[in-house]
Image: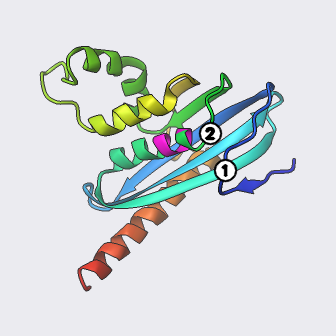
Amino acid sequence: MNMQNITAGALPQDSQTRIEIYPDGSAVGNPGPGGYGAIILRRTAAGDIVKQMERGGRDLNTTNIRMEMTAACVALESLGKVTDEPITVFSDANIVPNGMNDWLPGWKAKGWMTASKKPVKNRDLWERLEAAAAGRNVTFTWLRGHNGNPFNEAADTRAYREARGAEAALARERGY
């Protein structure tokens, strides 16, 4: 199997491929400095990886959930033009698939309020994630974290590294 690591640009599509996304988020202190990582794979119908991308970033004041959601947003946004290619987002944070699969329509119908009549947390990211998924053939699925999936582990490692980088940047900013 010939696997390429692509760090920029969109993944080319053919009719026999599917995309897998593994987002992860991390925060030091939660809230605190945080980071995200996402592994994006394109597989053939036979399951061979033909392309791989990795994305990551950081924020000086955030939560692990915000970073998990940001990772999913960035990954979907990095795919380029909208196609009907099957995409599965494997999140180890239940809130992402639950929110996208079950809760989003109710929140919108209630003016972005929860069942307990409180404002939905992270509305900006739910709207961004919905927009990034719009028109695409996306399935959001829960994946048990730290269970040996190499792509989930790679996303976790990138998120942790980014969070530690944000922590160091914050310390420099504060003169530590």
Q: Main secondary structure of the magenta part?
A: helix
> Which corner quadrant of the image does residue 76 belong to?
top right
User: x and y percent of residue 83 in the render?
Assistant: 65, 26
Q: Which residues are magenta?
A: 72-76
The answer, for residue 167, to whether it is visible in the render is: yes
What type is the residue that disc 2 sits on? Gly
- Residue 3 appears left or right of 132: right
Figure check: 142 above or below 4: above
The residue located at (45%, 61%) in the rendering is 160
The image quadrant that residue 28 belongs to is bottom left
Q: Residue furthest right?
A: 1
Q: Dots 2 and 1: beta carbons under 8 Å?
A: yes
Q: Which residue is mark 2?
A: 80
Residue type at the position of mark 1: Gly
Distance between the alpha carbons at the discs numbered 2 and 1: 8 Å
Reading the image, the residue beneath label 1 is 9
Name the residue: 62% across, 39% down.
80
Numbered disc 2: secondary structure: loop
Number of numbered tags placed on the structure image: 2
Q: In the image as oriented, which residue stretches furthest toward the front?
A: 81
Quadrant location of the C terminus? bottom left
Question: Which of the pair 76/81 is nearer the observer?
Answer: 81
Q: Earlier in the sequence, mark 2 or mark 1?
A: 1
Q: Position of residue 109 (x, y in %)?
A: 25, 14
Q: Is residue 127 magenta?
A: no
